Image (cartoon, rainbow, N blue to C red):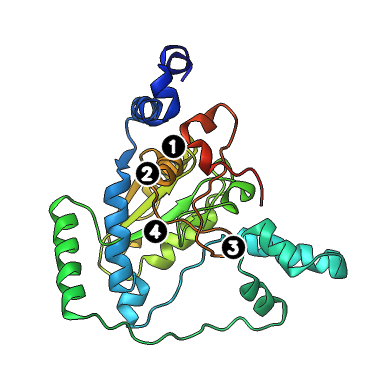
Amino acid sequence: MATGETTETAEEAKSPGWSMWLTCKSMRAKFPSVRQIATDELDRLLKAQQASGGSNEMASGAKKKQRSYSYTDMEAALSAAKIGQDKVTVYGLSKTYGIPISTLNDRLNGRSGEVMGRPSVLTEEEETALCEYAKYFADRGFPLTVLLLDSRPVEEYSISHIPDAVRVDHGGDLTPALDRIRQENDTSRPLAVVAYCSVGYRSSVVAKRLEEELKKLPSGNSNRPISIYNLEGSLFKWANEGRAMEDSECKTTTLAHPYSSLWGRLLNKQLHCWSR
């Protein structure tokens, strides 16, 4: 990183592309055992999953939006509401913990049942495209079902994240992530767990820790193969390429938290957003 700062030309300084390439190379060297997935490959995989209705939705025939927050986030929000009583607002809790307002209202008012969606019906063209996507990834060893783990703190996650990503603490308890993996582990189809952060360091830590935790599980405890990946270039590269992101209210956004003034140089300047 330091070398890139002193040697980049004026033209390179206008775009983080060159420094991002060096950063990705550095992450691969630092975490050689962590498998990488490129942003374009993940994007195609997510579109294929969306077309199919996702993992559990595909099995049940009903489409259901996945949570974009962790269980610890929900527990913390409910605890804050209980302690603060009328001193906190649902909007404030939603903004702080990255939980949709409607979901918080339901939990606070005792309405936590699942909402059934209509069956997902694909057109002939969509089905053909889905089959092509599935074959593309099968030929390259990638599964169709993916679980996204955002390895950043709430303040970064609330600005933007990849849709349906579950937030985890990279240096904290990974139980929520492991619980989610167990929830998804309900069919014989392979599961890909893709971790990301700002540029890839924190998510590589998460990917490595998850690999170690999964090795501790009994061999008969998994119903399907589980592969752990780090998103190469992570959210900064994803945002620079104009790919889909949403904020804590599930609204589409192009902005991202720059993490710091130094690492923020890897994110296009017009995409910087420090707070909501």
Alpha carbon distance from label 4 to label 2 = 12 Å
Residue located beneath label 3 in the image: 71
Residue located beneath label 4 in the image: 147
Q: Decide: few, some or many residues near mark 3? Use Cα within 10 Å; few <14, some 14-19, many ≥20.
A: some
Circle 3: residue type: Tyr
The local secondary structure at tag 1 comes to loop
User: In the rendered structure, which disc, 4 or 2, sits on the residue that comes first in sequence?
Assistant: 4
Q: Position of residue 118 (x, y in %)?
A: 39, 87
The label number, if any, that marks residue 231 in the structure image: 2
Contact, CB < 8 Å: mark 2 with mark 1?
A: yes
Residue located beneath label 1 in the image: 200
Q: Relative to 122, is 150 on the left or the right? A: right
User: In the rendered structure, which disc, 4 or 3, sits on the residue that comes first in sequence?
Assistant: 3
29 over 231 or under it: above or below? above
The local secondary structure at tag 4 comes to strand
Alpha carbon distance from label 4 to label 3 = 15 Å
Alpha carbon distance from label 4 to label 1 = 17 Å
User: In the rendered structure, which disc, 1 or 3, sits on the residue that comes first in sequence?
Assistant: 3
Instruction: From the image, state whether disc 4 or disc 3 is nearer to you.
Output: 4
Instruction: From the image, state whether disc 4 or disc 1 is nearer to you.
Output: 1
Contact, CB < 8 Å: mark 4 with mark 3?
A: no
In percent of the image, x 43 and y 76: which residue is there? Answer: 64
Instruction: From the image, state whether disc 1 or disc 3 is nearer to you.
Output: 1
User: In the rendered structure, which disc, 2 or 1, sits on the residue that comes first in sequence?
Assistant: 1
Q: Relative to 193, is 179 on the left or the right? A: right
In percent of the image, x 27 and y 56: which residue is there? Answer: 44
User: In the rendered structure, which disc, 3 or 2, sits on the residue that comes first in sequence?
Assistant: 3
Circle 2: residue type: Leu
Contact, CB < 8 Å: mark 4 with mark 2?
A: no
Q: Position of residue 36 (x, y in %)?
A: 31, 40
